[in-house]
Amino acid sequence: MKTLITLILLAFLPMAAHAQGAARAGSGPLRAAYSHVAVVVDGDVARTTLTQVFVNDLPQPVEASFSFPLPADATVTGFAEWRDGRKVDAKATGKEEAREAYDRAVDRGERAAHGESDEEEARFRMTLSAIPAGGSRRVELRYLQTLSALGSERTYAFPRGGEAPAATLLDVEVQLAGDRPLVAVATPNQPDARVSAAGATRRVVRLSRSGVGLARDLVVRWRQDSEPLDLAARAVLPAPGTPGYVEARFAFNDDPLGGRVEGRDVVVVIDTSLSMAGLPLKRAREGALALIDGMAAADRVEVIAFADEVRSAFGGLSQDAAGARAFLKGLKAGGRSDLEGALAAAAERLAGSPDAVLVLLTDGQPTARSTGADPFGLDLDSAAFAQARVVVGHFNYPHRTAALASIFPNVSVRFIPDGPAGEEAVLALARLAVAPVIEDLSVELLGDDVHLVHGALPARLAVGEHVRLLGRVQGEAYVRVTGTLYGRDVEMTAPVVWRSGGDDLGLPVEWARLRVADLDAEWRALKDAPTREVVAAEIRGLGTQFSLATRFTGYVMNDSLDPDHIKPGDPEIRVAAPASAKAVFAVLPWGEVVACSWDDEEGLWLGRFLVPRGVEDGLYRARVFVEGQGGAACRGALFFRVDSEMPPFELTREGDDGPVAAGDTLALVARPVRPEVPAGKGGDRIDPDPLDVKQVQVSVGGEVWILTREDAADVWSGKVPVELPPGKHAVKLVVMDYARNTTEARLWIEVQ
């Protein structure tokens, strides 16, 4: 009987990334040898690549089934696994086609994998072939998400990994890039994270842990220089002769008029069910208290608490701030959540209010009235909140954010992480709830040929919020914003700036994501089957073209897919650990775990590895671990250089380097010129790749001579007769590898 393993990668949204996962068999968890999260944030878009390596220490093979909860505003753009050191990317195709291809591959006994998204549960599920006893499996998931911004401040977070055993090695790297200077980059929950500058508009945040997980969510928070009202648009042209992709962004970062709205009606709805016990309820209370402290004297407030029953502070709107504080301080957690009853009471309080604000603080768990098909089971008229601003503070279960947001016409959702970062987040939420608002907002992309524009456009925008639209464009275009602030007209325009670099901004995929989201909403609203199939066909086509996981698109990989090519050579790891060690292994920068074996002849632990084609040239480090009776300990780091180009060679002659006479013989020697690599600790080292040289030749006076390689050395030599007239002549060296790359060198000689 096969054992089913499930890997769960927790995701916090809308601003979170998966960091660590757990693979578990019936007898216990698989060992996580390596976890790596690499994030590139460009503006409001985060591209996340998750890599994990799990080792099956069990005496029997286990089948692996991975399940990844996804952020609400995230789309999977690909997944891959490694086979014999080679990365194999899955192919995006129609869901049914992917399932059938997977089944056929399994029936043929091929190694295969299948992945698809589950829209109802906001998960991406992946099924892989079995991990053999003592074997390992490396997987990669890639996805895009849009980050929420609070004015000029942005936040990216990933979770501490729940109760899963800590990976032997955890590496996190977050690259931040903006079009304006970045300031105040901080990691409030992890003071040991390193922040380094890569220019005024770039920062890199790195965190490494060995054998110790994250005690708190890792939160990266930063600000970007900006104007109070910030409008910009940019476009790229991936292929000549086709429409480009344009992005417009309008941000209400600060109040340019310095006014203040008084006489607002604010209803705070706070979840006190059992799932909110502890820190979530504490944070929710802190946010609600901060909101009340920030209200004006003329504002009215109501506080509604809900669990099995719905209770309120006043039974209506009141200016009794002290009473609201006392009610909040007396709240305790327990029971299930009656969200429907709480929202019905809130709608009653806000009915007829010209400037109403609803603040909902909840973890979004299924309610006491849930029907099963609907996660909330709400019998509620959302039109009751059409005139109100809704701000949601979301705790604990971020995969429910999309369902929460769908309840309200105008909503801003913020996930509240744990630790000091969560304290800052609820205070920011309180500021957002009572912030000034631009009314009657309109954001338009205009030009000669602007079409297929997508993105949410609210009728009102509060300080700290922004609007982002993406579309297709051909020719000159501009963006225009209109609205009113304190009854005064707001009007701005900005040209679309074309940027070079093709798809370096990821705008085509971002546009496809937003179009798929709008088409999916259209498909769900349609009742006519033929029309639905037309919409489904376009979603399927976009998913296949842009490699997106959609309602109608899945992924498949089997033995017929071509893996990445491997660079020639196999560097050797040499570790001078004692023979009594239980195991020695190295973790490479791209996630591969290299197991070393004891060599009696050399008295060392030796291991070899290959370098995937996608790895950029440069200096890298591998971490070496030695496992003894007390567990695995990090021994140190070894450095090695990846270089896909032929190294330069030098050509020398042995003996006297003075003039030669016609008829003499030149003893020539060719050697590669290699850069030095820093040595490792304790005499450990990584020997470079053996040179993949096919032929070494010299030409003298139009004649070509082949040099021969000396045994076990990167040295080629030969004796060449000199049949040249008097004067200065060049001896030309040409070295060629099996990929037909060449390098040259010259040696000048004087013939008497």
Image (cartoon, rainbow, N blue to C red):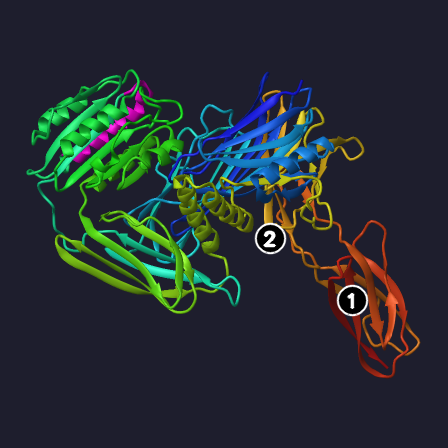
**Amino acid marked by disc 2:** Glu
| Quarter in which the C terminus is drawn | bottom right
Residue 563 position in % (x across, y down): 68, 45
Q: Nearer the viewer, mark 2 or mark 1?
A: 2
Would you say the magenta stretch is mainly helix, strand or loop?
helix
**The residue stretch that appears in magenta:** 273-292
Which structural element holds mark 2?
loop
Q: Residues within 10 Å of mark 1 (few under 14, many from 20)?
A: some
Residue 369 falls left or right of residue 140? left
The one nearer the camera, 714 or 472, is 472
Which structural element holds mark 1?
strand
Give the labeled residue for mark 2: 616
Give the labeled residue for mark 1: 734
Q: Upstream in the sequence, badge 2 or badge 1?
A: 2
Residue 506 falls left or right of residue 439? right
Residue at point 60%, 50% (across, down)? 619
Picture layout, residue 705 above or below residue 566 = below
The one nearer the camera, 470 or 371, is 371
Picture layout, residue 197 above or below residue 491 = above
